[in-house]
Amino acid sequence: MLSRGAKRWIASVTPEEVAPYFHEYFMSATYRKKIDFSARNTKAMWDYNEQKVAKLVAEMPMTKWTNSSKGMISYDGETFALTFDVEEEHLKKLHGWTKEVCEYRLHRYFERRG
């Protein structure tokens, strides 16, 4: 979502739309691939399969984020969306903050698991 830029990042998205970016992120670094995709059932995902990756994205992170978002995010089984509005003048700043938080949390996640 964040790769769409400050004006479009808050638009809803489907797991199928996210799947190629999710897969590329994990497969582009050997340490990420080995940490999260080394189990028997996930090793098969080293080769991109949109249906399998989209299913994984839907289960986690989309469903997990929705369940812990206190109503700020929704996922209806097809579409992942923010449930709040952002005023135009705040889009760029909120995009930047969100990107920083995501990058930090991903870094910490892999640092602890690695």
Image: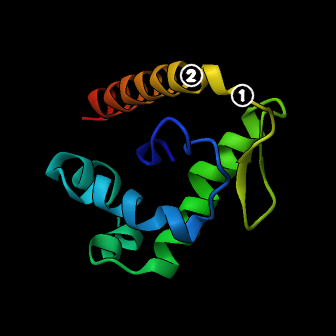
Which residue is drawn at the image coordinates 49% and 19% (left, top)?
97
Which residue is drawn at the image coordinates 32% and 60% (left, top)?
37
Kindly check if marks 2 and 1 are in contact, taking CB atoms under 8 A apart as contact: yes
Q: Nearer the viewer, residue 4 or 31?
A: 4
Q: Which residue is mark 1?
A: 86
Which residue is drawn at the image coordinates 51% and 47% (left, top)?
1
Disc 1 on helix, strand or loop?
loop
Alpha-carbon distance for marks 2 and 1?
8 Å
Q: Which residue is mark 2?
A: 94
* 39 left or right of 98 in image: left
* 100 left or right of 68 in image: left
* 49 left or right of 85 in image: left
- 20, above or below 31, in the image: below
> How far across and down, in percent of the image, does residue 60 sit?
58, 53
How packed mark 2 is, by other alpha carbons closer than 10 Å (few <14, some 14-19, many 20 or more), is: some
- 47, above or below 63, in the image: below
